[in-house]
Amino acid sequence: MKKKSFAIFIVFLFIASLTFLHQKILIYVEAYKISKNHRLSNELVDKRDYLVYNLTKETSVQKINQWAEKNKFSPTEKVLALNLRRTEPVKPANKVMAMFTDLLGIPTGSSTALAGEKE
Amino acid sequence: MKIRDGLRVNYIYAFFVFFFILLFLRITYLQVFRKNFFQNLAQNQYYRLIPLSGKRGAIFDSKGRTLATEINTHSVFADPLFVKDKEATARILSENLNLPKQKIKERLMRKKRFVWIKRKISWSEKEKIKALKIKGIGFLREHKRFYPQDKLTSSLLGVTDIDSRGIDGLELQYDSYLCGKDGMVRVLQDSTSHEIILTPQIITPQEGRDVILTIDSQLQYWAENFLEETIKKFSAKEGSVIIMNALTGEILVLANYPNFNPNNLKEFSPQIMRDKAVCDMFEPGSVFKAVTLIAAIEENKFSDSDTIFCENGSYKIPGSTLHDVHPYGTLTFREVFKKSSNIGVGKIANRVGSQKVYTYIKKLGFGDKTGIDLPGEIRGNVKPPSVWSKTSPYMIPIGQEVGVSLIQLVRAYAVFANDGYLVKPHVVKAIYSQGIYKEMPIERKMVISTSTAKRAKGILEDVVKDGTGKLADIEGVKIGGKTGTAQYFDVKAGHYSSTQYRASFVGFISDLNPPVVIGVSVFEPKGSHYGGVVSAPLFKKIAEKTVKYLGGEKIAAAFPGNQN
């Protein structure tokens, strides 16, 4: 009886030790995986940084302006008319037409020609 | 015989017992009493602390364009103990890293376990060396400061050292905000030197705060281009431009030429890096006459139609003689400033009184730092009347015997445009960190009455419309300002130079809402040295772009009677 109990105890101890060892190895395997992923993620971050570096460099204010100047493109300039006195809007001579334009909110031109200045 | 054998067995038994007791004692000593020592020894061998650097904050302009940021990069190091063929390794590294072979070899010969080969290399360089799999050569991840706009705003931004600490400009001024805090991670190192994150005891690194500037890169680009054009046209030595919001003191542009590329510091001398608009002092010349204008109006000494006899171009004063560029007879108070008569202004200042003139010089902020958030600002040189020379009461009002900086002039001219307030110029709009956006406060104080500011503004608008600043005029836009031509005082020779001049123009665009002040200064122009010829056209070019760029809805709101 005593021998049987001792054998069971030994088997139990062996299984427990094996489980413990297995868990320990699993932890190390996971740690290796995490470390590998960490390395990979760092490499991707580095690659992204170098891409951002190139992108930012190529889209700098200087580069955009140089391109705009070369292609005669002015994206930021607004053409203005300054210090012009307010003038009465030009109303259509026909009363019915005038009523229609008022009702539908159709913009009418002012007597000061700003066509050249409005772009 | 049996007794002797038994005794021998007992001896052997006793010997083993004694041996095991000794062994047990030794083990107990090592495991119990020296436990900590050996535990530390093992941990030092297996565990390693890796520093994690806290990323430095970025710098953005007012529209969110990146002016300075940090990118991850790699630095190459060597463990000379593991590098077997030092000659061949030095040759390979030299070819791939563009470094002298001898320099690398000398480092590899050192009796150290860690030597830098090259810091902050490019991605392609790293990949090339990594592919070579040289034993004893490794890489460390580091951050690198990167300025995407290259030369743009360089003298304002300043630079950082190799360890990403600010050493000049905004990088230095706001270093405590921008600088991140380093962290640490503990990793296990296996027999092949692979790092395993097993029990990470991390001190999380803290990122630095982002700084948002008041600067507009687009305006800055135009200003820098026009400044460079002018400097090349007149073969000048250097120049500066400042554009400031007159209501708030926000600096929209701060440009200096020559400038430098902060990404490639080795090519430039420290002299070029100086922010001349803030750190350089010069005699302002006629732009300083605005102080006398304000003093005379605020003290109610002259009406616009009062006349001053300008001595036909030459006027003897105590200790010297005042001259006008063009001889004038009698001019009205308004005309004196319009035509920039030295004699007229000298006489006006004399009637106002030296003490009063000095009071207004100080009220407009000359002789004191403006408080701009940039390092190295110069105070200027303004002497109190008690130490003035015989010529000073006439010379100081026309901008001689006095030292100012361009930022001081721009701040003083903002008083005309904002109805009498002295603002504190600043380049940082806000500081951003982890979702918290903290705006910097706007400081200003009233120094002259609104009516004085408005009257003086009208006179300065006349200077541009019909006076010495005509070349700065833009059709349909209200602009006021004053030209300035100052001889350079040669400190070594002890007298004014006959060849070195500073041509300036400081003015404001009243039509914009908010109004802006533009200060332009060009040093040592050749061909012509007059502020009205060199700086006024430069002002005009910049003002035209500024009006078009900042105008639009704002300008319409300021003039509800207008249409656009």
Image (cartoon, grey):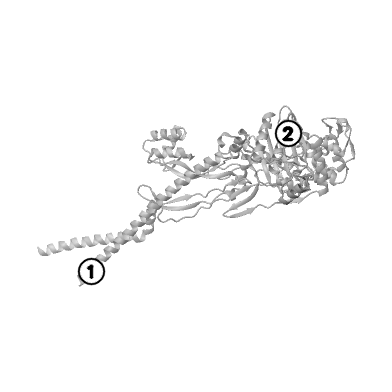
Residue sticking out furthest to the top: B527
Q: Nearer the viewer, mark 1 or mark 2?
A: 2
Exactly how many numbered labels are in the figure?
Answer: 2
User: Of residues A52 and B562, which is closer to you in this image?
Assistant: B562
Chain letter for the residue marked with disc 2 in the picture: B
Q: Visible in this render: residue B241?
A: yes
Neighbor class of circle 1 (other Cα within 10 Å; few <14, some 14-19, many 20+) is: few
Q: Residue B537 got which mark?
A: 2
- Residue at position x 49%, y 54% from top? B204
**Circle 2 Cα neighbour tier, 10 Å, few/some/many (<14 / 14–19 / ≥20):** many
Element assignment for label 2: helix
Whole-Å distance between the Cαs marked 1 and 2? 105 Å
The image position of residue B143, as x and y in percent, is 51, 45
- Among all residues in the image, which is located at the extreme left? B1
* Residue A6: assigned label: 1
User: Which residue is located at x 23 percent, y 69 percent?
Assistant: A6
Which quarter of the image is occupied by the N terminus of chain B? bottom left
Q: Residue at x 48, y 50 (%)?
A: B52
Identify which residue, B364 or B519, lies in the foreground: B519
Q: Amino acid at mark 2?
A: Pro
| Residue B503 appears anywhere in the view | no
Residue B300, image x, y percentages = 87, 46
Q: Amino acid at mark 1?
A: Phe
The quarter in which the C terminus of chain B is drawn is top right
Q: Is residue B44 left or right of residue B277?
A: left
Are marks 1 and 2 in one subunit?
no
Q: Nearer the viewer, residue B536 or B479?
A: B479
Rendering coords of residue B31 (x, y %): 34, 60
> On the image, which quarter does residue B113 sit in?
top left
Could you say which disc has been placed on residue A115 in the image?
none
